């Protein structure tokens, strides 16, 4: 029968290129490490290493088996971690990046309520409209709008049917009137978002097959600032429905052209690897989904 500690010796030896280095890393004697390798080779009926007095290298069979051995150890570790966490109170530190507007005005109160329910969980939040590089920045999770460019990331939908909507304040509409159709947007002051020297002044409406080139006297790389300008009556904004629902419900903004379907902007919770989808992350995902569904009930 294969022994887990023998497989660990094999993987460590392959990683470190020497039996003695593997033994030191596992805090066992070289003799025990050598016996473990011999026992594994006899059990598998394979020669895993080609040995000389001065070198140790994997055989072709060893290289093939190494991939399976690594995966077996990874799965066992994940299974142990899942059981361990399942037996414990939900706890730990979550480092989360998120966009500015939805982060400050929607997600922050949701996360506050989540933390109040699970006080052993700590949060470290990074708020920016620049997409976090999860491979370089110290974040575990990201809440992101839109489709993922990196297919290697794990995506968990939070608001899968969210779309952009056209909004303006009652004050602006009293002064300037409301557009009767998309073509009339060119006659209005449109509040635009800009990021990394790219000005998003072409508003797309895929369901209508239209892209409207808009103009205006204000743009910002902070989506929250664009929303604030709209609330202040300074123009028309094309925003995620999630970002402006509270303003619409409170009467600070009005929905324009409600029959026009805006661009899809699904919100998702993203991490780098499935091993990061811990019970805490699953609970957070389910909590945010539930809050989004409650918010959707107010849209009618």
Image (cartoon, rainbow, N blue to C red):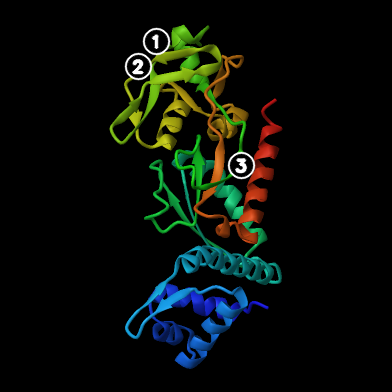
Nearest the eye: 210 or 218: 210
Element class at badge 1: helix
User: Vertically, is 45 above or below 193?
Assistant: below
Instruction: Judge whether 47 appears above or below 198 on screen.
Output: below
Quarter holding the C terminus is: top right
Q: Which mark is residue 258?
A: none
Q: Which residue is mark 1?
A: 186
Instruction: Point out the frontmost of discs 2 and 3.
Output: 3
Q: Position of residue 194 (x, y in %)?
A: 34, 31
N-term-proximal mark, 2 vs 3: 3
The secondary element bearing badge 2 is classed as loop
Q: Residue at x 49, y 39 (%)?
A: 148
Give the side of residue 129 with respect to residue 251, left or right.
left
Q: Residue at x 65, y 60 (%)?
A: 279
Q: Which residue is mark 2?
A: 215
Q: Nearer the viewer, residue 199 or 252?
A: 199
Residue 87 placement, left or right of 100: right
- Disc 3 is placed on an element classified as strand
Q: Do the residues bearing badges 1 and 2 touch, measured as CB atoms within 8 Å?
A: yes
Question: Where residue 297 sits in the image (x, y, percent)?
Answer: 71, 32
Residue at the (31%, 30%) spot, across then down: 198
Dot 1 or dot 2: first in sequence order is 1
Please report the residue visible at 61 percent of the width from the left and 60 percent of the height from the top.
278
Q: CA distance from mark 3 to mark 1?
A: 34 Å
* Mark before the other along the chain sequence, 3 or 1: 3
Mark 3 sits on what residue?
A: 158
Q: Is residue 91 left or right of residue 238?
A: right
Is residue 115 something that shows in the picture? no
Report the mark closest to the observer, 3 or 1.
3
């Amino acid at each position: 029968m294969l022994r887990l500690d023998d497989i660990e010796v094999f993987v460590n030896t392959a990683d470190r290129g020497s039996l003695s280095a593997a033994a030191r890393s596992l805090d066992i004697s070289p003799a025990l490490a050598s016996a473990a390798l011999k026992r594994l080779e006899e059990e598998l009926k394979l020669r895993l290493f080609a040995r000389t007095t001065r070198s140790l290298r994997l055989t072709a069979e060893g290289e093939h088996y190494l991939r399976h051995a690594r995966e077996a150890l990874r799965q066992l570790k994940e299974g142990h971690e899942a059981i361990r966490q399942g037996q414990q109170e939900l706890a730990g530190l979550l480092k989360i990046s998120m966009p500015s507007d939805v982060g400050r005005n929607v997600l922050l109160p949701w996360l506050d309520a989540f933390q109040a329910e699970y006080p052993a969980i700590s949060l470290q939040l990074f708020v920016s409209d620049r997409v976090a590089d999860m491979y370089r920045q110290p974040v575990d999770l990201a809440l992101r709008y839109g489709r993922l460019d990196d297919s290697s990331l794990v995506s968990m939908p939070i608001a899968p049917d969210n779309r952009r909507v056209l909004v303006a304040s009652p004050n602006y509409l009293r002064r300037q009137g409301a557009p009767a159709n998309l073509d009339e947007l060119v006659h209005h002051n449109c509040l635009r978002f800009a990021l990394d020297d790219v000005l998003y002044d072409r508003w797309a409406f895929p369901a209508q097959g239209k892209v409207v080139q808009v103009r205006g006297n204000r743009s910002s790389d902070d989506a929250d600032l664009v929303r604030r300008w709209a609330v202040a009556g300074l123009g028309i904004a094309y925003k995620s429905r999630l970002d402006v629902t509270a303003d619409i419900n409170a009467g600070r903004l009005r929905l324009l052209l409600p029959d026009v379907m805006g661009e899809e902007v699904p919100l998702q919770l993203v991490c780098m690897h499935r091993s990061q989808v811990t019970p805490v992350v699953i609970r957070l995902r389910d909590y945010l989904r539930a809050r989004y569904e409650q918010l959707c009930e107010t849209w009618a």
